[in-house]
Amino acid sequence: MFSGTGPDRQDACIADRPGNGSEDSMKQTWRWFGPYDLVSIDEAMQAGAEGIVSALHHIPNGQVWPSDEIRRRKDEIAHMKDGTPSGMNWEVVESLPVSEDIKKQKGDWRAHIDAYKQSLRNLAAEGLHVVCYSFMPLLGWTRTDTAWRLPNGATCLRFDYMDLAVYDIHLLRRGNAEADYESDVIREAARRFEAMDDDERQRLARNVFFVLPGSTETLSLDAARAHIEEYDSISASRLRQNFVDFLEEVIPLAQELGMRMGCHPDDPSFPLIGLPRIMSTEADYNAILKAVDLPENGITLCSGSLGTRAENDIPGMVKRLGGRIHYAHLRNVRRESETTPCSFHEAGHLDGSTDMVAVVAALLNEEKRRREAGRADNIIAMRADHGQDILGDLDRHTQPGYPAIGRLKGLAELRGVMAALSPGGF
């Protein structure tokens, strides 16, 4: 954790601080979910965002993103509520989802790859060149509580490992689920399940399979159970090979189109409900980057997702893999134990288990290295990912994890760190 005091911390910041050169730093973006988002483009501008990250959540997974829909989203981003030009651009596609058929190589997976490639062509034709995506089976991200109350009255996202066991064993009723848990976890999960009323059980089930606003994707318990049963026959090594097969199709096209693809890590970065995980550690990333060794095959660095695993050295990952980082999510989690798996909650951007100052310093140094090497992609887009619900957020009920004021606070804190670490900042 960054304490902000002491000679060791100060020396480390100075040692990692970028040298003289361009004053450019990471582009500060803001995730916007489109017309369904209760936080407007106007408010993103007021928060100081320099660009927008968005996606077409209403297009079903596996279908082509039509050019007219891409242009419509660009136009929505380019205007404020009153029609005044916003000056904002769609900077990063987050995300162009990979269908479950592609991940499992079942059903219409070949047609879905063709649709994915056509979507890339359509996006490139509209000037979009950075794509964030993930290869997580079934779950895009997992939390058990979307409004966990902190001592100061704010609320945040939380993952409670014990509540996940309740869901897995007693609500999902996954076959042989108890084999994945220690005996004390099984006993406590049974106690918690008996203490829950129907509303609490339904809320937990909704939280685990939460969907994005405007999305066409929904998942009942029966549908989740059916997907998980199909994954029973897919080992981590098999899923990794399926991922490589996908990359061998899309990355050469991305190179042809001048696009950069950044894979988001598993969230959280450890196995859940019997599903394989293949993008949780530095070794996982090295395996995928080497398998399709083209610069367009890269990373969406998410310090929050990677931070759920104590052994992940995130500043070190930036230094060692930085040349392949195409986009960054900067957020912090507080691990509630140093075991893997663990419970955790979304902390303030500078207050969690990850040294965010060191992460930002490493990213700024990577940008400096790229400038010196003459790389055109020498500015890395980032966003202040997630945020606690504070002040007026508590009554607004926006997309969980994406409040207006909480994200503004996080972006302001990160902006201050970047200013302090940039040339002339001290």
Image (cartoon, rainbow, N blue to C red):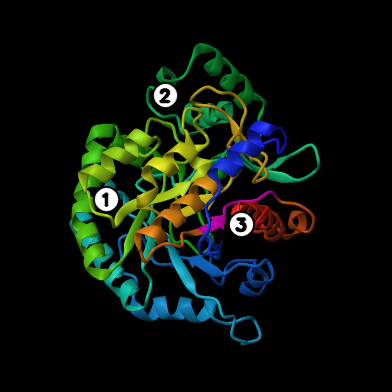
**Cα gap from disc 2 to disc 1, whole angstroms:** 24 Å
- Dots 3 and 1: beta carbons under 8 Å? no
Task: Identify the mark at residue 177; answer none if there is no mark.
Answer: 2
Q: Which of labels 3 and 2 is toward the front?
A: 3
**Cα gap from disc 3 to disc 1, whole angstroms:** 27 Å
- Dots 3 and 2: beta carbons under 8 Å? no
Task: Identify the mark at residue 399; answer none if there is no mark.
Answer: 3
Up the image or down, 146 lies above or below 418; here it is above
Q: Amino acid at mark 3?
A: Gln
Q: Which of labels 3 and 1 is toward the front?
A: 3
| Residue 49, percent from left and from top | 61, 67
CA neighbours of label 2 inside 10 A, class few (<14), some (14 to 19), many (20+): some
Label 2: which secondary element:
helix
Q: Amino acid at mark 1?
A: Asp
Q: Is residue 56 left or right of residue 415?
A: left
Identified at 70% across, 35% down, the residue is 3
Identified at 61% across, 73% down, the residue is 41
Region in magenta: 382-388
| Residue 362, percent from left and from top | 50, 46
CA neighbours of label 3 inside 10 A, class few (<14), some (14 to 19), many (20+): some
Viewer-closest of 26 and 339: 26
Magenta stretch holds residue 48:
no
Sequence-wise, which precedes: disc 3 or disc 1?
1
| Residue 24, percent from left and from top | 53, 64
Q: Which residue is tagged 1?
A: 101
| Residue 84, percent from left and from top | 62, 87
Viewer-closest of 142 and 347: 347
